């Protein structure tokens, strides 16, 4: 008997769909990774990693690996969201094993998918870690720690922000 998807799973799928639409609207080529685990190498588990959702293709540059998440900002007016420490650590391991960073990109229905918050998995590990109700640990990600790209803006906002961030660190 097939299990019905949870509301959270459906929100996650909808967020991925909105992200792919935003990329398409801006003429950005991408390759989504198949969700069928039978078609993925079991060796990823051997390395203690997992697969991202999408590969964004950057002409003459290469690609970005992205994991898209539906994350509404935390309650009480805090401008932050939570990411599972287990998932973050698997993507940090992916980076260590294969030399490619995986970026988390989050948005939500509450933001009308107009703002996309980007942060590399290895940078998430610099954020505060807390225990949540079920004993799981999560990283608290302040949205101002992320690079925020507008849906109707140019995708180049991401690279401009990365350039200026690197420039500030070198001063």
Image (cartoon, rainbow, N blue to C red):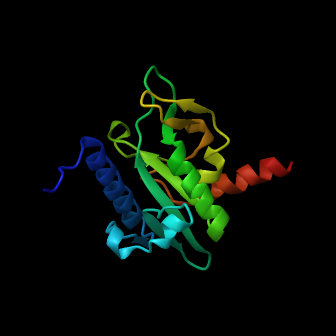
Depth check, front residue: 8 or 68: 8
Q: Residue furthest top?
A: 76
- Residue 163 on image: x %, y %: 71, 57
Image position of 29 (left or right of 2): right
Depth check, front residue: 55 or 2: 2
Q: Residue furthest bottom?
A: 60
Q: In the figure, residue 126 lies in which quadrant? A: top right
- Residue 145 on image: x %, y %: 62, 40
Q: In the figure, residue 29 lies in which quadrant? A: bottom left
- Residue 15 on image: x %, y %: 34, 51
Q: Is residue 115 visible?
A: no
What is the tally of numbered marks visible in this picture? 0
Image position of 51 (left or right of 9): right
In the image, residue 139 above or below residue 157: above
Q: Is residue 169 visible?
A: yes
Q: Residue furthest right?
A: 171
Q: Residue at x 24, y 42 (%)?
A: 7
Q: Residue at x 37, y 64 (%)?
A: 25
Image position of 40 (left or right of 100): left
Q: Residue furthest left?
A: 1
Q: Residue at x 53, y 29 (%)?
A: 131
Depth check, front residue: 98 or 163: 98
Q: Residue at x 49, y 65 (%)?
A: 45
- Residue 128 on image: x %, y %: 63, 33
Depth check, front residue: 155 or 61: 61
């Amino acid at each position: 008997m097939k299990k019905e998807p949870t509301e959270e799973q459906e929100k996650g799928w909808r967020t991925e769909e909105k992200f792919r639409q935003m990329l398409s609207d801006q003429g950005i080529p991408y390759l989504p990774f198949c969700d069928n685990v039978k078609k993925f190498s079991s060796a990823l588990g051997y390395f203690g990693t997992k697969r991202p959702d999408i590969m964004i293709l950057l002409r003459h540059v290469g690609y970005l690996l992205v994991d898209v998440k539906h994350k509404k900002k935390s309650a009480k007016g805090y401008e932050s969201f939570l990411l599972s420490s287990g998932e973050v650590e698997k993507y940090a391991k992916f980076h260590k094993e294969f030399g490619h960073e995986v970026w988390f990109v989050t948005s939500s229905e509450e933001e009308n998918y107009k703002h996309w918050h980007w942060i590399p998995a290895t940078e998430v590990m610099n954020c505060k870690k807390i225990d949540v109700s079920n004993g799981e640990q999560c990283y608290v990600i302040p949205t101002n720690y992320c690079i925020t790209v507008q849906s109707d803006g140019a995708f180049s906002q991401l690279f401009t922000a990365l350039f200026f961030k690197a420039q500030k660190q070198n001063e």
